[in-house]
Image (cartoon, helix red, strand yellow):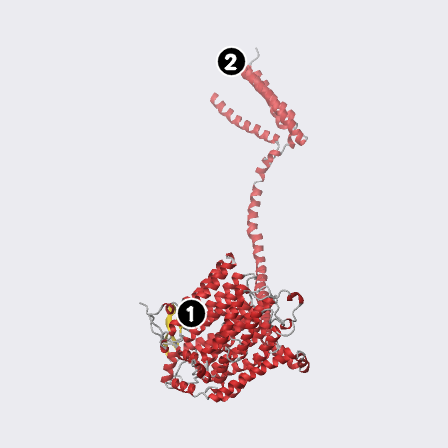
Amino acid sequence: MNPLPYFLDHIWLIPLIPLAGAALMLLFGRRLPNRAVSVICVGSVFVSFIYSIGAFAQLLQRAPADRVVQRVLFQWITPGPVQTVGGLKGFLAEWGLMLDPLSAVMILVVTGVGFLIHFYSIGYMGHEGGYYRFFGYMNLFMFSMLTLVLANNMLLMFVGWEGVGLCSYLLIGFYFLRKSAADAGKKAFIVNRVGDSGFLLGIFLTMTTLGTITFSGAGRLDTPPITGIREALAAGFASGQFVSGAPALTAIALLLFVGAIGKSAQIPLYTWLPDAMEGPTPVSALIHAATMVTAGVYMVARTNAIYQLAPLALEVVAIIGALTAIYAASMGLMQNDIKRVLAYSTISQLGYMFLACGVGAYIAGIFHLMTHSFFKALLFLGAGSVIHALSGEQDLRKMGGLWSKIPTTARTFLIAALALCGVFPLAGFFSKDEILWQAYSSELGRDLAGIFWVIGALTAGMTAFYMFRLVFLTFFGKSRVPHDVEHHIHESPRSMTVPLILLAALSIVGGFVGVPAALGSFVGISHYFERFLEPVIAQYAPHAAEATAAAAVAHHEPMEYLLMLVALATAGVGIWLAYTMYLKRTELPAQLEARFPRLYGLIYNKYYMDQIYDALFVNRARDLGTALGGFDSKVIDGMGVDGSAWLTRRTSRISIWYDTWIVDGLVNLSARIVWMFSFPVRMLQGGRISGYALFIVLGILIFLGYYLKELRAMIR
Amino acid sequence: MVPTSHYLFLSLALFTIGVVGVVTRRNVIIILMSIELILNAVNINLVAFAHLWKQVSGQVFAIFIITDAAAEAAVGLGIIIAFFRNRETVLADEMDLLKW
């Protein structure tokens, strides 16, 4: 009898149902009517969502320490010995799913937000060709993402990791007839590949260092026990085999982070994400804001057992995260494409999450991941709704004054913008504040804590500025919409506005699960989210748990209030600046632009990073390709293929001579000999009748002569 | 009474003239006429022996052969006319189609 309750026992259905939907679409979708496609694909994600809720609820019913379940579907790589640093170890990889608080939160976010975006797509993609293809890819993406999140080992996670990369490529290039879209898809795929190679090397190194790639051995019921990464590291730490900062662990952590950099678009591999906006807007919302790009953060949080023993790697994570946060935010300041502003904002917010992970506050990172997925998905869907209303216009300079024309979109968009800016009490406030506080107070990044905090706060101000620049330019002020487009402005259909409203609700209340201690006394549920996720974070020293708890109690409350207020004030300044520049004194931006042309040009052109990458890598790769192509055409084709052809032709002359003179010559010779000897016989057959007649007569005479001789002999 | 050998010599002479004509003459019509000579030489032979043995069947055969010769002359002349229409010649040494 299986002791697991229904939903926990069936977590494997969560990724499988969207896979079934995808298979159905990609095999038979062409023949299905759009209505059936919608029902199957949106329905499959919905069922998956229901199962996720069920699994989450049943996980909650268990004791906190017991909240982990592994379901092994089958053994993927059968056990075999592998040479590790600590001698031979048995190694295996399973097709196994693990549900613990971390993956539970992730599947809720993925299926929940994913369902809303799927639902939204019914309206948004309704007029597009390739409807079934779109939904097939989306469902395939859901499957890959859920596999990534639920995987119980690194290799299976990598499968999902590659799967989401593939779907991202397919969906960015959805309008593949447009060259820019096809190029953007390729760019995303190739840049991601750079990161993926790091991830893969990290997996190999984990395998040879620890002899296991399974995350944890806990929660295995009817399957043989197994040593997970967590247990192996804990044992190694206890026995002194691994010390904090061991080179091998640092290397693993850094390699894994390379993967995270690629997938989550951090410096220096961020350039693909803005280009990825070529895809349909629901894709941007689902893949390039809410779920896939956060996979890097999830991966760092999932392997925190390794990161905690690699302080150097953590510092790198924090620095990269902080730099990306402010760098991407600065690029978002001047963009004129509504989706690109959001793309840079996403990169910036992902930087926040890595900053949190880097200072050891994985939970704060995941918390921000969750709230961010709500309001960033909402922002993208809202932007999609605006674009829909304006018949495909994405340029901010051709918008304005839409507030009363598309009221639902505008109001929900404003809520999301406020949430992203971290305005109290929306979701973003709590998660961003938590990250800033952790950056300031954490043990890990103490020597850089002040800098991290300043960068974080500055980024918050810039975020507020560009978000409200976006809001003001889009919804307020004078309408700059071209006349012919203005007629068609209309609020989006129900299927699009309902997800907007639901996501807006989530953006408002989503933060309350993680109210910080300083404010917790008002609501009485302080740090619920953190306590829920606590078991996921590896504790090495036995007293660490108590130390964390003590630290939580010992929050310097006045300081936390102060920092909170400063962050809020920065956001306020950002909003005020945007208000002044883009609503009140609209001539200001142009004046500033004229005043600082170089700075403006630098930011507007995204620091020329794309050009630098083109010069450094893309064109060099192309040069290499040209050189290799030249080698191919000159050496391989020229000398190898053409040369051998030339040689063959030369040698064939000998055999041609042999054929004509020896082989054919012998045949002709025999014919000529026959011809020669047949000469007298040939002479007999002259064709003249008289000749033949003469032969007849001669024949008769010879016959008669012989006969007469006999006759005479008889007579005698 | 004329002895049988005289008939036979006449027949032999006619036959020889016919054969030589067939072999040596170029004109197909003359060749045809020579064949008539050969046939009639045979007729003389048949009639001579019928007279010698006092049997009528030899004369019957001679009449058959005369009929046959008439038919043969008709067919032969027909062939010659058809041939002349094709090749505009009646010379035997130009009739070399059988070679091919």
In this view, which residue lies farthest toward the top? Answer: B1
| Residue A552 on image: x %, y % | 43, 85
Residue B95 can be seen, yes or no: yes
| Residue B26 on image: x %, y % | 65, 28
Q: Residues within 10 Å of mark 2 (few under 14, many from 20)?
A: few
Residue at x 46%, y 76% (from the top left corner): A299
Q: Chain of mark 1?
A: A
Amino acid tagged 1: Ser
Dot 2: element = helix
Residue at x 62%, y 34% (from the top left corner): B97
- Residue B23, image quadrant: top right
Q: Which mark is residue A52?
A: 1
Is residue A608 positioned above or below A630 on the image? Answer: below
Front residue (pair A166, A662): A166
- Residue A469, image quadrant: bottom right
Amino acid tagged 2: Trp
Is residue A71 positioned above or below A462 on the image? Answer: above
Front residue (pair A457, A700): A457
Dot 1: element = helix
Front residue (pair A311, A619): A311
Q: Chain of mark 2?
A: B
Q: Which residue is mark 2?
A: B53
Residue at x 56%, y 55% (from the top left corner): A658
Foreground tag (1 vs 2): 1
Residue A269 can be seen, yes or no: no
| Residue B31 on image: x %, y % | 63, 25
Asked if marks 1 and 2 touch (Cβ < 8 Å), the reply is no
